[in-house]
Image (tube, grey):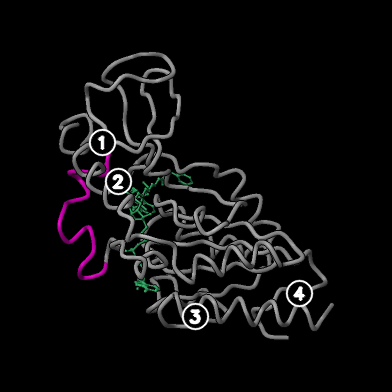
Amino acid sequence: MSKTTPNPARDGSIVILTGAGISRESGLHTFRDADGIWATVRIEDVATPEAFARDPDRVHAFYNARRRGLLDPAIQPNAAHFALARLEAEWPGEVLLVTQNIDDLHGRAGSRNLIHMHGELLKVRCGACEGVSEHRADLGRADACPDCGHVGAMRPHVVWFGEMPLEMARIYDALARCDLFVSIGTSGNVYPAAGFVAEARSHSARTLELNLEPSVGASLFDDARLGPATVVVPAWVEALLAGAGTAA
Ligand code: BJW
């Protein structure tokens, strides 16, 4: 049994963390690569609550452009997204997919046990009633909340620096129980997601990194496969499912 094959003596559950790298071959930018989003715009200007309070129009414009980009018909899930959906459907244990991405490509590929810990680009939230609603058009200060009618308090349903990521209790519970933790396409710069590998290890899970290049926390992984997500993720899923079939 490979070091990063789940151990049948435990419950065989897998937690997978994904980052911007898995969507890059679908045509979406990462954040910290040379051509990434943070090379063109400053975090302090668009991705903090203070930025939104200071200049909401600028923040709305940033997310409106990204929402339009995501809705471009050319942007589609790739082989890595589909492989993870296949794993969830065919793996005998639990597969929990935790994504830092605000795109909807995992859902479109068929993943269902999915947590968007940094929110979702195609949803908006009301600052008055906290209601969350689906939204595909541009958003601005003149928009009213579809739930409470309040005008001027709508914001993208995303988690900015200094805000609490979503569903943390559920994520930490899964990390404490998982047999295998897999990190895909994330640089490991942003907490708390960057701390998940240490958390899983502290509960004796094995750990695997699938990435184009080693992440900041690479030394914490038992094993790594480096390459484009559309190559390494389907290959890993295929091998894992073939092994599970043999063991059964
Ligand atoms: C490929 C590929 C291909 C490329 N195939 N791979 C000091 C210590 C610890 C923490 C802090 C600290 N100071 C401040 C903090 C907290 C702060 C933080 O982490 N700051 C750091 C910068 C230090 N974190 C927060 O504020 C978070 N909240 C928080 O901590 O609340 C308190 C709390 C504590 C404990 C428990 C619970 C709560 C909130 C973070 C919010 C992040 N928001 C963003 C933007 C919003 C959404 C959006 O606009 O999209 O989320 S920032 C941005 O970074 C985005 C991403 O989700 C996130 C992670 O980026 P990701 O996915 O890793 O992308 P990249 O570009 O960095 O990496 C891409 C990778 O892919 C690379 O490795 C490439 O090689 C690879 N790749 N092509 C495979 N084809």
Q: Quadrant of ligand 1?
A: bottom left
Q: Is mark 1 within 8 Å of ligand 1?
A: no
Q: Which residue is mark 2?
A: 67
**Residue at 41% over, 14% down:** 148
Give amino acid for label 4: Asn
Residue 6 lies, in percent from the top left, at: 71, 73
* Circle on res. 232: 3
Give amino acid for label 1: Asp
Quote the CA–CA distance across marks 4 and 1: 47 Å
* Circle on res. 138: 1
Q: Which residue is mark 4?
A: 7
Helix, strand or loop under label 4: loop
Q: Is mark 3 within 8 Å of ligand 1?
A: yes
Left/right of residue 189 with respect to residue 143 in the rendered view: right
Dot in front, 3 or 4: 3
Quadrant into which the C terminus falls: bottom right
Dot in front, 4 or 2: 2
Sequence-first tag of 4 and 1? 4
Question: 61 or 172, which is in the foreground?
Answer: 61
Sequence-first tag of 3 and 2? 2
Dot in front, 3 or 2: 2
Quote the CA–CA distance across marks 3 and 2: 28 Å
Q: Are marks 1 and 2 in contact (CB under 8 Å)?
A: yes
Helix, strand or loop under label 2: helix
Q: Which residues are magenta?
A: 33-49
The quarter of the picture where residue 205 lies is bottom right
Helix, strand or loop under label 1: loop
Residue 131 lies, in percent from the top left, at: 45, 24
